Image (cartoon, rainbow, N blue to C red):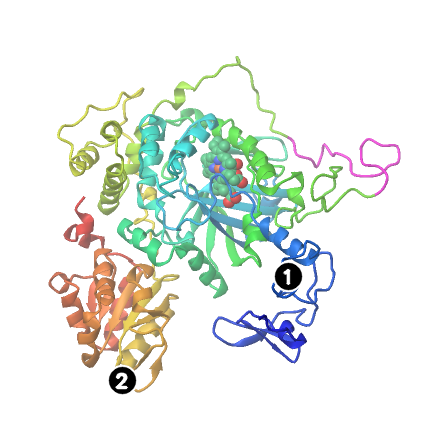
Amino acid sequence: MAKRLTKSTRSKTSDPHTVSIHDQHLHRGAGGELHQFAENRQDVLTTSQGGPVADDQNTLRVGARGSALIEDFHFREKIFHFDHERIPERVVHARGYGAHGFFETYESLSDVTRADIFQRAGEKTPVFVRFSTVAGNKGSADLARDVRGFAVKFYTKEGNWDLVGNNIPVFFIQDAIKFPDMVHAAKQEPDRAFPQAQTAHDNFWDFISLTPESMHMIMWIMSDRAIPRSFRFMEGFGVHTFRFVNADDQSTFVKFHWKPKLGLQSVAWNEAVKINGADPDFHRRDLWQSITSGNFPEWELSVQLFDQDFADSFDFDILDPTKIIPEEILPVRPVGRLVLDRMPDNFFAETEQVAFMTQNVPPGIDFSNDPLLQGRNFSYLDTQLKRLGGPNFTHLPINAPKCPFHHFQQDGHMAMRNPVGRTNYQPNSFGEGPRESPAKGYRHFAAQEQGTKVRLRAESFADHYSQARQFYISQTGAEQRHIAMALTFELSKVETPVIRERMVAHLLNIDETLATTVAQKLGFRSMPGPADAAIPTRQDLEASPALSIVERGPKRFEGRKLGIFVSEGVDAKLLKALTKAVTAEKGTVEIIAPKVGGVTADDGNWIEAHHMIDGGPSVLFDAVALLTSHQAIDDVAKEATARDFVADAFQHCKFIGFDPSSQPLLDKAGIAASLDEGTIQLSDPKDISAFVGQLGKLRVWGREPSVKLGKA
Ligand code: HDE
């Protein structure tokens, strides 16, 4: 028999997080504390039509156990809205994370561009940035081996400028018409719908092995650039050659680079795989934590500027998006800085609904004829219509310009702003509304164009191997090993032998040692011949150290994280000294303990932990320290997760500090006999500065050949 509901039981909420006290709704936070909803805590819940709601716990039904009534407009509206909460995810770059900030111009660039954003030193322009992976779906893991999107929307005083770049300066293809094929091949195979967020499968490598123009990009995505440690530690690139145009309508070619202030850093592949399990939101959490704790990430915008003479004399076609101009040949010039200092209030409203479009350029910035860029200029508008459901996506606050704007576009789905007054056209006789302005308006650069209508790829785009080789020879030994290991891993997942062979044939045109290493690791019984090359690989291109992550690493531990594993009886003085030294370097410390509650230190004080050892593996940290005690270490060393913590840190070539009592854990982790300059004993507080002084080097890559990781 159904219990008769009284008025008081009806009004009580069944949500365990919400309790009703004195008619005020209080929310229980994650830490158990009670705090009031920001504002409107006393407001009455309403429908979206504004009607007050009396009961949000029970549908309207015929008797307590009877059928539901169609008349229940509140239920109908609530479920209807929920059913429509999703919009199509981006066809590429679906998984992303954004933040607000500003761009500050260093100096006037009025000699080369009339773009308002570059006219005045010290000028600050609001920006929104979205980082992303490309192939995976919205819910995929952050540490997929993939290109990262680096899209910046500048809300300039002359309209939005979207610099929709990547963390890799070249691309897979030279012509936009190949983009759907390339993306289809990279994403899940259509019949089985896997693998998710991975290029390690037949379709991808089949397409690539049949597309020699992608070889330069392949070197980049098989390098550690494709597994960055943080969005904060990666470069960004506009990829294409753009134009700056000045007030006299003169054009200068420009390539855009973002340089992270804290230096470059990536993780090891074995580490990336484990991070994906331990914290699939690793990059999101990192950005969230650094911005909300006031450590605002920063990048410098640098430009490579050149004229037609340089373009004509350069070894490659500056319109070819599979080529770079090495910084050693054409130095980059810093022109401003980007600071991210605010997380969105709402992920969906801002990060999901932001619409980047390469064609959003203000006066003074123009396009080149790069065939990929030309295709993109068509695609981005189109995709927003599909994704955001109508032509009025610019009415969303995240997409609306922050400068005054006036036009006669009207109506359409969800129009929130329509022209006011009688005239919605121009010219008109009433002197109403905005008019075009030849002086202030956007003037397309008057490039001389002529030619026959053809479907042709320029001969100057035909060298597919020389810069791939240049990238490879510019890497340090460890980085070259990682490329070989990545290729081996990816191709080991390819089930069709001929595809593996075709790839090794391409590698022979890039570097023979690389090709033979990969072939040997894949178990080839004979080597294929080199792939046919339209243009033989140039051997004379010099290495460009700017292409190495290790060469462009940080100078100190700033912005990085030390994980300190502690046990009961930890030496409180040592822990304090270590924490202080890392904090002085502007690094952060997180404590890992057998239990998340924490441990009692040797001075009787309670040390709270951030993680329990099972949930805080060493892959989440840039370096680790072990501070235990003689009485606790035997129990600690029995824990597989504690042993993995140490063994992983060692195989990932991290710095490990340990106090003498932790020695048994090193033994059990199997590394006691292999200690090197990266494993540093912390006997007393004076050892701390030696240890922390080393941390800015991040990794002891010299260790790698001695651990399994380096045996590719
Ligand atoms: Fe994109 N790309 N792309 N792309 N792209 C999209 O636009 C496209 C390319 C890049 O965080 C889509 O709004 C074509 C290169 C980023 O919202 C779509 C071609 C570069 C983002 C699209 C390219 C990029 C996108 C999907 C070949 C680096 C994410 C959703 C001609 C310079 C932006 C959307 C964000 C997103 C098309 C190639 C960067 C479909 C046709 C090269 C960072 O319009």
Q: Is residue 16 above or below residue 228?
A: below
Label annotation for residue 59 = 1
Label 2 SS:
loop
Stretch of the chain drawn in magenta: 421-443
| Residue closer to the observer: 249 or 495 | 495
Q: CA distance from mark 2 to mark 1?
A: 58 Å
**Side of 161 relative to 486 (left or right):** right
The residue drawn where x is 21% and y is 33% is 515
Type of amino acid at the residue the image marks with label 1: Thr
The residue most toward the top is: 452
Name the quadrant of the C terminus.
Answer: top left
| Residue closer to the observer: 333 or 436 | 436
Q: Main secondary structure of the magenta part?
A: loop
State the image quarter where residue 508 is shown: top left
The mark total stands at 2
Residue 322 rendering spot, x and y as whole percentages: 39, 31
The residue most toward the bottom is: 604
The residue drawn where x is 68% and y is 47% is 403
Residue 62 rendering spot, x and y as whole percentages: 67, 61
